[in-house]
Each structure stands twice: as structure tokens, then as C-alpha cells.
């Protein structure tokens, strides 16, 4: 930051917990995640826009491939869809001011957000709070399958966070930054291509790996 203004803003804060099947959660569970991932991002961006306009700078918002496809419940996916939408409208509004707005869509990486132990504890905590009617409808097997699916997904996580930070660097320093960056092989080869498929087809593909309820 200097007297002419602010050249770059990177919004990268985020949480994923509470997360679980939507019916297992409360409105407050959704609000907790949305406040950090979306409302906080909007608030920080709006407060710094005058400085960014003055410098004709850059806004870099870290969304997720889960802002393109959504296959688990809770506030995380809606928050990332919101980041995408906010970024799209802001990019158009800032165009005449010379401010570039970029979105980064990482796949799955080994971070605290994707920590399996934390997520598994979160699922069990949500399960314990459920009314018996909902537990009976889903069955304990659903919970076990959900955790097993999570552990299987963990094997695809990348530990190379430079794939994300390289996107940030390019967005901040390139003469012609991209509107969107995908980070990680799973983002490029799986999730983003899936987002272009008809919903019926992508639903069928996800359902093949999804837990099965007893109800």
C-alpha cells in the first residue's frame, strides 16, 4: 500500500466446518461459513475498493471448484458460488476504472480446511445432534459410508500449494491477468469439465460414489 492507492488484494480466508448433509445442519451452521467465506470477503473488498480504484489495481478472490459443482452440504459450496457471482459482477463494474478482478478455483489440496480428522469429527458431532427420526431415515451406515468416501477423496489431495500461489502471483503481476484460474489436476481435468455437463449426467456420476440411505 502506498499513497497512490492499493495495487493488490487477495481474499483467501475460508472455513468449511460445519459441513454435513444439508438436513443434518441448522441455519446457524450455514451462516457461520457464509459469514467468513462470502460476507467477510465482500466486506473487505468494499472497504478497500477506493484504494484499488486509485491504483487501478487487482482483486484476486479465491473461490473453489466447489463454486462450479456442488456435491456436499453445508455453507461451503453456496459461499463459493457466491464468491464467483460477486467477482463476476465486480469485474464488470470495475472495468472502466482499470481494476482487474480475478477468481482462482483450486481443486483439493492438503490444508486445514480439508483435514480429514477435523471433518470426520464434525460429521460425528452433527450426527449426535440429530433427532431419532432423521437418524433412522439415513441409518448409521450412511455416516460410515460418508466418512469412507471422505478418506478415499483424501488420496487425491495435492500437497503442492505453489499451484495456487503461482496463480495468485500471475493474477497480481501479469499485464493481462485471466478472469479465472484453475489450480490442481483435479480442477483442470475433473471438476471444471464436470461443471459443463448436463446436470442429469453430473448427478449420475456423483451419485455412483455417494452414500446410500436406508430410507
Image (cartoon, rainbow, N blue to C red):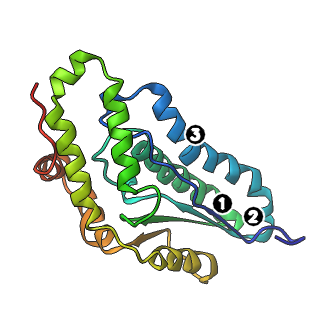
Q: Residues within 10 Å of mark 1 (few under 14, many from 20)?
A: some
Is residue 201 something that shows in the picture? yes
x 47%, y 54%: residue:
84
Q: Is residue 58 left or right of residue 32?
A: right
x and y percent of residue 166 in the render? 51, 80
- Which sits earlier in the primary sequence, circle 3 or circle 2? 3
- Which sits earlier in the primary sequence, circle 2 or circle 1? 2
Q: Judging from the image, what secondary structure is the residue with disc 1 in?
A: helix
Q: How far is the residue under mark 2 from the one under mark 1?
A: 10 Å
Q: How far is the residue under mark 3 from the one under mark 2?
A: 23 Å
x 41%, y 72%: residue:
183
Q: Judging from the image, what secondary structure is the residue with disc 3 in?
A: helix
Query: Which is nearer the eye, 194 or 136?
Result: 136
Label 1 belongs to which residue?
Answer: 94
x 52%, y 55%: residue:
88
Q: Judging from the image, what secondary structure is the residue with disc 2 in?
A: helix
In the rendered view, tell whether residue 200 sits above or below residue 90. above
x 74%, y 72%: residue:
7
Q: Is residue 26 left or right of residue 43?
A: left
Q: Is residue 175 left or right of residue 130?
A: right
Q: Residues within 10 Å of mark 3 (few under 14, many from 20)?
A: some
User: Which quarter of the figure is the N terminus placed in?
Assistant: bottom right
Label 2 belongs to which residue?
Answer: 52
- Which sits earlier in the primary sequence, circle 1 or circle 3? 3
Q: How far is the residue under mark 1 from the one under mark 3?
A: 24 Å
x and y percent of residue 201 in the render? 13, 51
Query: Which is nearer the eye, 197 or 160?
Result: 160
Is there a contact, CB below 8 Å, between mark 3 and mark 2? no
Of marks 1 and 3, the one in the foreground: 3
x and y percent of residue 17 in the render? 45, 43
Label 3 belongs to which residue?
Answer: 35
Amino acid at each position: 500500500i502506498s499513497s497512490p492507492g492499493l495495487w493488490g488484494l487477495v481474499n483467501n480466508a475460508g472455513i468449511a466446518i460445519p459441513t454435513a448433509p444439508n438436513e443434518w445442519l441448522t441455519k446457524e451452521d450455514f451462516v457461520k461459513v457464509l459469514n467468513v467465506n462470502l460476507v467477510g470477503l465482500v466486506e473487505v473488498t468494499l472497504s478497500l475498493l477506493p484504494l484499488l480504484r486509485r491504483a487501478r489495481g487487482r482483486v484476486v478472490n479465491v473461490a473453489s471448484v466447489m463454486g462450479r459443482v456442488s456435491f456436499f452440504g453445508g455453507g461451503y459450496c453456496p459461499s463459493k458460488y457466491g464468491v464467483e457471482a460477486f467477482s463476476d459482477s465486480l469485474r464488470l463494474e470495475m472495468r472502466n476504472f482499470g481494476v482487474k478482478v480475478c477468481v482462482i478455483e483450486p481443486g483439493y489440496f492438503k490444508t486445514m480446511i480439508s483435514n480429514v480428522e477435523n471433518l470426520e469429527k464434525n460429521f460425528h458431532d452433527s450426527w449426535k445432534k440429530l433427532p431419532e427420526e432423521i437418524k433412522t431415515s439415513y441409518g448409521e451406515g450412511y455416516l460410515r459410508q460418508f466418512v469412507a468416501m471422505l478418506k478415499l477423496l483424501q488420496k487425491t489431495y495435492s500437497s503442492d500449494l505453489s499451484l495456487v500461489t503461482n496463480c495468485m502471483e500471475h493474477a497480481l503481476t501479469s499485464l493481462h491477468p485471466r478472469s479465472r484460474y484453475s489450480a490442481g489436476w483435479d480442477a483442470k481435468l475433473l471438476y471444471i469439465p464436470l461443471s459443463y455437463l448436463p446436470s442429469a449426467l453430473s448427478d449420475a456420476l456423483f451419485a455412483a460414489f455417494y452414500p446410500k440411505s436406508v430410507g
